[in-house]
Image: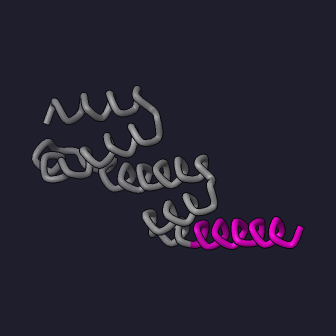
């Protein structure tokens, strides 16, 4: 019984530390800790939060030349959308990339 409680405690600590890193913007560290805790749903949440952060950065871009300068951001958004399992979102961003 002690070992079960010990594992539960480790999982809890890893998840709490991961949440701290997620809120700090350290997405990779958060994913690693959620992986240790076995929480796949929160791993997808880290992808979503990172996607939203990039989307906020590119949402104010209005002219094509500036958007082209952020092509890497759009590629990262496609990658994150695929990792979230949202193929429609990935296709939407690919459509934007084709126009660039």
Give the image location of residue 42, x and y in percent: 59, 52
Q: Residue at x 52, y 47 (%)?
A: 44
Vertical comparison of 11 with 46: above or below: below
Give the image location of residue 7, x and y in percent: 74, 67
The one of 56 and 2 positioned closer to us in this rendering: 2
Name which quarter of the figure residue 89 lies in. top left
Q: Is residue 75 left or right of residue 7?
A: left
Q: Residue at x 45, y 32 (%)?
A: 86
Q: Residue at x 70, y 71 (%)?
A: 10
Query: Magenta span has 11?
Result: yes
Q: How is the image coloured?
A: one colour
The one of 84 and 59 positioned closer to us in this rendering: 84
Count of numbered labels shown in the rendering:
0
Give the image location of residue 91, x and y in percent: 32, 28
**Span shown in magenta:** 1-20
Name the residue at the left extreme: 65
Look at the image and tell me in which quarter the C terminus lies.
Answer: top left
Q: Is residue 78 left or right of residue 30?
A: left
Name the residue at the right extreme: 1
Type of secondary structure dominating the magenta stretch: helix
Look at the image and tell me in which quarter the N terminus lies.
Answer: bottom right
Vertical comparison of 93 with 41: above or below: above
Q: Residue at x 51, y 72 (%)?
A: 24
Vertical comparison of 78 with 3: above or below: above
Give the image location of residue 48, x and y in percent: 48, 48
């Amino acid at each position: 019984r002690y070992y079960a409680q010990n594992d539960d405690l480790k999982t809890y600590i890893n998840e709490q530390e991961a949440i701290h890193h997620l809120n700090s913007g350290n997405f990779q560290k958060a994913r690693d800790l959620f992986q240790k805790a076995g929480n796949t749903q929160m791993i997808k949440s880290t992808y979503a939060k990172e996607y939203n952060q990039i989307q906020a950065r590119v949402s104010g871009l209005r002219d094509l030349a500036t958007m082209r300068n952020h092509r890497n951001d759009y590629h990262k958004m496609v990658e994150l959308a695929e990792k979230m399992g949202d193929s429609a979102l990935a296709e939407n961003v690919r459509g934007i990339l084709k126009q660039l």
